[in-house]
Amino acid sequence: MEERGWDSILLYGHAWRKECFRCLVNLNFTGPYAAACLTRSGDLTIAVSHPWDDEALSGIDATVTLEPDFAAAFARANPSAIAGMEFAEQHFVDACPRHPASATDHVEELRRVKTAEEIAILRRATALADRGYRHFAEVIEPGMREFELVAEVEAFLKENGAEHNFMLIASGGTEVVGMKPPTERVLQLGDAVTTELTPQVDGYYAQICRTLILGEPSAKQREAFAIFQEAQQAALAMLRPGVTAADAARAQNDVFRKYGYGEYTGSKYTRVRGHCLGLFPDETPHILEDVDYVFKKDMVIVAHPNTYLPLAGYMVYGDSLLITDTGVEVLNSTAKELFVKL
Amino acid sequence: MKRGLITWDRAELPRSVFDTRLANARAAMAAAGVPALLVYTDIWRANQGRFLTNFMPYWNRSLAVIPSEGAPVLLCGLSPRVYPWIESVTLFEEIRPASKLVPTLLKLCEERGWQALGVLDLARVPHEVHAPLAAAGLALKDVRLTTIDEAALAMHRRAAELARNILGDVLPAGVGITGHQFAGRLERLFRREGAEDLVILLSAGATAPLPATAAELPVAYSVSIAVEYRAHWARVTRAHAAPPALEAAFAAGGGVIENLSGPYPYELGSGPLTARHVEITHAGARLFHGDTCWQGVPL
């Protein structure tokens, strides 16, 4: 704040994007909105939009108010800057007596390098992702519907303490070009079943991506998966502080190019080669060849060369990684292989 | 994100229901003198877009554009690789990729020669969409539409019945297990019945209902469920080992009222569709009871 001449920052969250608020007040709020206003002198005021959130914060060393009309919270705070301003409803921003600056990028950069406490939480989240995937692989069977499989995994994660989960799924063969929410499709022998599993523990998301074949994998499914393994290994081998997101994307994409599948590294067939993890499951920077962000020690990211290949359809493969002094530590302990359910 | 079943069952919501809703939207556009209506939609603020088109951007955001003439257009933040799925569960036949929403919208306006736009609940559009749109020189007009009709009410009723039935069966099983274990059990039951989303809050008697913890649930505990069934939320709160006085307190009226016809299931406010709950203290435990109500009466 001092560097930018701000006297206060309001950290805003709503039901979808809680990360700016939760980086200062780690409350998984129930109402639609919450905001914390921190002054340069260290005073903290918190506004919530539901009485049960108000009660949950009783005893905290801050002034807490319940604001049924949440624009009033913005008006009262009158902040110099807002983190999460982009997501805020326009009438909230308009309620500020002075025109606030956006602090979203600045706060996001502060959030990228994790503290020891945050890393410990992310290790627990990763361990739950591993256990969740083991459960996924145990319960899956031909004849299940995709949404029934997701129900089983969701139940397992919640039973074991997950607050929330980001999960995409797909099943089938070469016709599958990407993942989406679960459908009523019935799983069949021969299917490649992909999932991106991302449980949230104490606010923080960790991810695992794996591909499972129902029945004996075909030669093409094995050939395709070997390319994904090699691509992710290429990223693991070069990631360290000082490497850019572009470098990490290029290392993965070059493996696909080597095998003649370069066209499948573009946006027509894939999204990103990984991203940062934290209080939002899809934090920036995204790992793409045009992103020059330089990775730092103690960032936690996922590297996943997920894409469509004509060999066997869409496949996924990814692990959560902690950037260390000299390289990366793979946080996931799940076997780094093509899973098979016979 | 939404991890439940997002689908369009044409027997539940026939195409004719959406045709009527679009006709009403076009009447509102005509009254406002605008050639098209913009509907912002994200994972939570999806109710209006869903009401008109059945579209849900399960972890992202999009803009639905309803022209006064011609088919709706979706400006989509999701990958074109999921367009076939979107087309299978929505009205949309034209979907345009829009990683940058407003520039894509402005291009559409230019193509169609639109100088003005109606925007559903203009003041509630997020700043990052509102600010560049307001700066683009288009005349923006706030448009309001009701998102409740008989078909929607039937879906809310179905969601409420689902919650009442499951909670009626499962409440005894919560005693003596942890909040996390009980939440997991509820997730399995609701999602296997096709729930699209679920918010579970538990009270062990000492607090208001809050997200589940590893603490064991005692004999007297309460659970508050918000369940979304095919875009329609219902709220049901029940207590185990509740004395008759709890239901009597609810029947007497009053309590906390929340608006269920907006985007958020726990938003204070009133309206014809609400969630209402009451609280009593019995044998030292706080107990909660609530339900989804239409014009004040449980749906």
Image (cartoon, coloured by chain):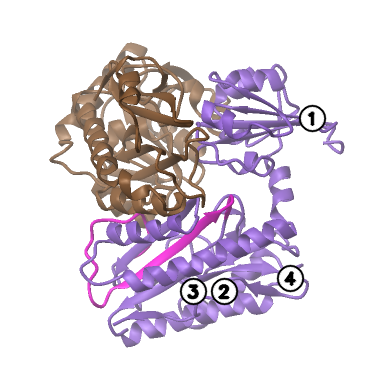
- Disc 1 target residue: A43
**Distance from label 4 to label 2 (Cα)?**
20 Å
> Which residue in the structure is indicated by mark 3?
A262
Which amino acid type is shown beneath numbered disc 3?
Answer: Gly
Instruction: Tell me the CA gap for discs 1 and 4.
Output: 34 Å
Q: Amino acid at mark 1?
A: Asp
Q: Mark 1, chain letter?
A: A
Q: Which mark's residue is nearer the viewer, 1 or 4?
A: 1
Which numbered disc flags the more N-terminal residue, 2 or 3?
2
Estimate the x, y position of residue B101 in percent, counting from the top left: 49, 39
Sequence-wise, the earlier of marks 1 and 4 is 1
Please name the residue that numbered disc 2 is placed on: A252
Dot 3 falls on which chain?
A
> Magenta region, mostly helix, strand or loop?
loop
Dot 3 or dot 4: first in sequence order is 3
Find numbered disc 1 in the image and state the secondary structure of the residue it sits on: loop
Distance from label 1 to label 3 (Cα)? 53 Å
Q: Residue furthest left?
A: B11
**Residue at left 82%, top 28%?**
A7
In x, y percent, where is residue B2?
39, 47
Residue depth check, mark 3 versus mark 4: number of the one nearer the observer: 4
Front-lying residue, A192 or A31: A31
Magenta stretch, residue numbers: A176-204
Evaluate if marks 1 and 3 touch, with contact meaning CB atoms under 8 Å apart. Answer: no
* The N terminus of chain A: image quadrant: top right
Mark 2 vs 3: CB contact within 8 A: no
Task: Provide residue B34's location: percent of width, then percent of height.
Answer: 37, 18
Position in image of residue B166 (x %, y %): 26, 43
Q: Colour of chain B?
A: brown
Q: Looking at the image, which residue is at 64% across and 38% down?
A: A21
In the image, A298: left or right of B227?
right
